[in-house]
Amino acid sequence: MRTSSSGTRRLGVVAVLALLVGLMGFAPQASATTSATTSATPPYFALSVDHPTLTPGQSGTLNVTFTNRQTSPVTFLYVWLPLLEAGPQPAPGARAVLTGCSGQVSWCDLGERASVQGLYALVNLTAPQVPIEPGGSRTITLTYRYPADSDCTVHPVVSFSTNYFHYEYGDGSQSYDGSEFPDPPVTSTLVCPPAP
């Protein structure tokens, strides 16, 4: 039955994600690149932030737009979006915090685990946000902020990317697993507020 095979595939997605998290691999995988070039064109993600810089206490917004580059509808989409801090780390309790997920999305999980070195959003697009017709797109909006008591002297840089995604298309029997890294990464920088 299609229902059970679809469920098996999605269970496989979770298993692949667990493996990626366990390996803490943030570099593009050669196998994913090979698969992308030998199979159908992978989807394209566009990422944008509303503020290139943030000050302590300020909120920011990340928009993630997925466009279906296949010739048949996408029927399921799963995306792992980590929020990674580079450079000197802020004091404990003064890190960026994911505060919300909205837009054209059917399910979101915002969390933080030491094994993935920081914050992440796990995003599913199931009914009613699919199917996504050829050339069609869906936009997910994530909000984040730095606590007001953040140490602004360390200037951490926050990077967003679509480290891993899985989608199914056509009649659900075709799928793609892989990663896509924006070039350059979309970033927001914490800066000290202007002196009074």
Image: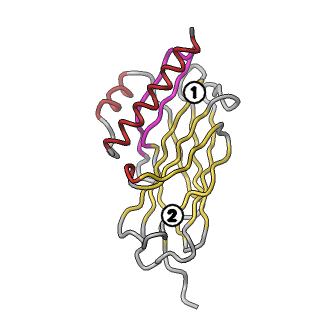
Chain-order first, disc 1 or disc 2:
1
Give the image location of residue 6, x and y in percent. 54, 18
Amino acid at circle 1: Phe
Which secondary structure dominates the residues rendered in magenta? strand
Q: Quadrant of the C terminus?
A: bottom right
Chain part drawn in magenta: 163-181
Disc 2 is placed on an element classified as loop
Q: Is residue 113 above or below residue 8?
A: below
Q: Is residue 69 above or below residue 98?
A: above
Q: Is residue 40 rendered to the left or right of residue 126? A: left
Q: Nearer the viewer, residue 80 or 22?
A: 22
Q: How many marks?
A: 2
Q: Nearer the viewer, residue 89 or 177?
A: 89
Amino acid at circle 2: Ala
Question: Going 42% across and 36% down the picture, which residue do you hit?
Answer: 17
Instruction: Name the residue furthest top.
Output: 1
The picture quadrant where one finds residue 177 is top left
Label 1 neighbour load within 10 Å: few <14, some 14-19, many 20+: many
**Residue position for label 1:** 76
**Residue position for label 2:** 96
Q: CA distance from mark 1 to mark 2?
A: 30 Å
Question: Going 52% across and 51% down the picture, which residue do you hit?
Answer: 111
Q: Is residue 106 rendered to the left or right of residue 151? A: right
Give the image location of residue 79, x and y in percent. 51, 38
Instruction: Name the residue furthest left.
Output: 30
* Residue 165 belongs to the span the image colors magenta: yes
The picture quadrant where one finds residue 158 is bottom left
* Residue 66 belongs to the span the image colors magenta: no
Q: Is residue 46 rendered to the left or right of residue 15? A: right
Disc 1 is placed on an element classified as strand
